[in-house]
Image (spheres, grey):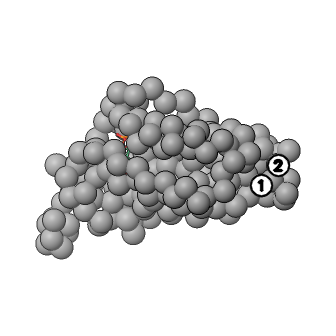
Amino acid sequence: MNKEHKESSAITPLFSAEAIEKRIQEIGKAISLDFASTTSESPLLLLVVLKGAFIFAADLLRTITIPCTVDFIKASSYGSEKISSGKVTINHNLAIEGRHVLIIEDIIDTGLTIQQVTHELMTMKPASVSICTLLDKPEARKHPVEMRYTGFIVPNAFIIGYGIDFNEQYRELPALGILDS
Ligand code: 5GP
């Protein structure tokens, strides 16, 4: 997709920057309450799935009031095609053993990526693994997933903005929208 195409593509607004901010405040409060027993000796590990969740994670992190650390994993799925290939790379040098891990994801679609990430993490002996996703597309689910925190339920359409791309574009948009095909 070139710049000209980008400018001519229609985007249907879905959630405003204000709505996103409000929902993230609520999720941050819930996480801080649920993991209130966390100590600085054993802080909550926010494991951010790159790249799509980076802006969500940055905003969410600043609403959390308990000790936590942040690390990143890479799960590539969509390139320039709007299809999921579900490839997951986890750095096994990550200190996971005995930690409470909260995976921060942008969108759960078929559920394949998060299922693979969770499976990989379980081999690294965490104390627990929970999932926090900004968006959930339940209509597209093929693999069962249990989310602990969900920002918004979305229709089975192609979403962009707020860190979420199409062909590496649109991440800079402050709001979420549907990229019309
Ligand atoms: P799943 O493995 O659940 O099918 O796909 C999850 C990943 O696919 C998400 O983390 C995200 O990177 C990508 N994805 C799923 N739906 C969409 C979408 O509507 N828009 C964009 N840009 N990426 C999506």
Residue 141 pos. (x, y %): 37, 29
Q: Say which element carries label 1.
A: loop
How packed is label 2: few (under 14 Cα within 10 Å), some, or many (20 or more)? some
**Residue at image point 69% right, 48% down:** 97
Does residue 82 show up? Answer: yes
Residue 103 pos. (x, y %): 57, 47
Q: Nearer the viewer, residue 70 or 164?
A: 70
Seen in the image, is 145 located left or right of residue 165? right
Seen in the image, is 37 located left or right of residue 4? right
**Residues at badges 2 and 1 in contact (C-beta under 8 Å)?**
yes
Kindly identify which residue carries mark 1.
43
The three-letter amino acid code for the residue at tag 2 is: Thr
**Residue at image point 35% right, 54% down:** 76
The three-letter amino acid code for the residue at tag 1 is: Pro
User: Height in image: 57 above or below 102?
Assistant: below
Residue 38 image label: 2
**Residue at image point 66% right, 56% down:** 95
Instruction: State the separation of the CA atoms marked 2 and 1.
Output: 6 Å
2 or 1: tag closer to the N-terminus: 2
How packed is label 1: few (under 14 Cα within 10 Å), some, or many (20 or more)? some
